[in-house]
Image (spheres, grey):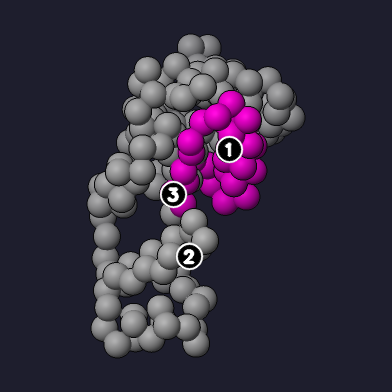
Amino acid sequence: MAMGSGSKVQVIGYKNSGKTTLITNLLEAAAKGGTRTGTLKHHGHGGRVEFRDEETDTSAHRNAGAVVSGIEGGNAFQLCLNMKVTFTQLLAFYDPLNLDLLLIEGFKEHQLPRIVILKDDEDVKLIEDSEKVLAVIAWPPVSKELISADLPFFRIGEKDRYIEFLVDLLKGMNT
């Protein structure tokens, strides 16, 4: 059950709100339905991403000056970019892969259709700063009254409900 051609959906929320858990749950549910998915995560912990491949040929290539290095084997491919890349350029890397769905964790400053996770009332600002909210998932301290009745709203403990809703919603995007 393919979801169309390349839907891109952000999952945003502040640190430790459950973004990675939600994405993992969505990936598992989508894979069961035959959906080809990919992910892109913003490293929001400050500093540079570490390559963790020291003592390898790929590291030697990079250390010798390659700004792009890749390694392939056994139907797996790893690409290292050692240069500044824009969000648009990052998204473009995924285009030729013919994914049904790209789940993007973070990159709050960019506007794509998004799922917003709220841990407390102050986080409602994330909704106010968003152009297209697909769903809101809130932890118990969040007051439901602060969320527009027009937005699909779920509590964090309603995993089965929101996963089913989101998988159905994502199937309908770009078909």
Residue 32: x percent and y percent? 63, 30
Amino acid found under the numbered disc labelled 2: Gly
Give the SS element for disc 1: helix
Task: Answer whether residue 21 is magenta in the image.
Answer: yes
Q: Please give the residue where the numbered disc 3 appears in the rendered image.
A: 40
What span is in magenta?
Answer: 12-41
Task: Answer whether residue 170 is magenta in the image.
Answer: no
Amino acid found under the numbered disc labelled 1: Leu
Give the SS element for disc 2: strand
Q: Is there CB contact under 8 Å for labels 3 and 1?
A: no
Q: Please give the residue where the numbered disc 2 appears in the rendered image.
A: 73
Residue drawn at point x = 47 percent, y = 83 percent? 56
Q: What's the mark number on residue 27?
A: 1
Residue drawn at point x = 38 percent, y = 30 percent? 7
Residue 123: x percent and y percent? 53, 38
Q: CA distance from mark 3 to mark 2?
A: 22 Å
Residue drawn at point x = 54 percent, y = 18 percent? 168
Pick the quarter of the image with the C terminus: top left
109 is higher (above) or lower (below) than 156: below
Residue drawn at point x = 38 percent, y = 64 percent? 79
Q: CA distance from mark 3 to mark 1?
A: 12 Å
Q: Would you call the spot at circle 3 few (<14 residues within 10 Å), some (14-19), or many (20 or more)? A: some
Foreground disc of the pair 3, 2: 2
Q: Nearer the viewer, residue 62 or 138?
A: 62
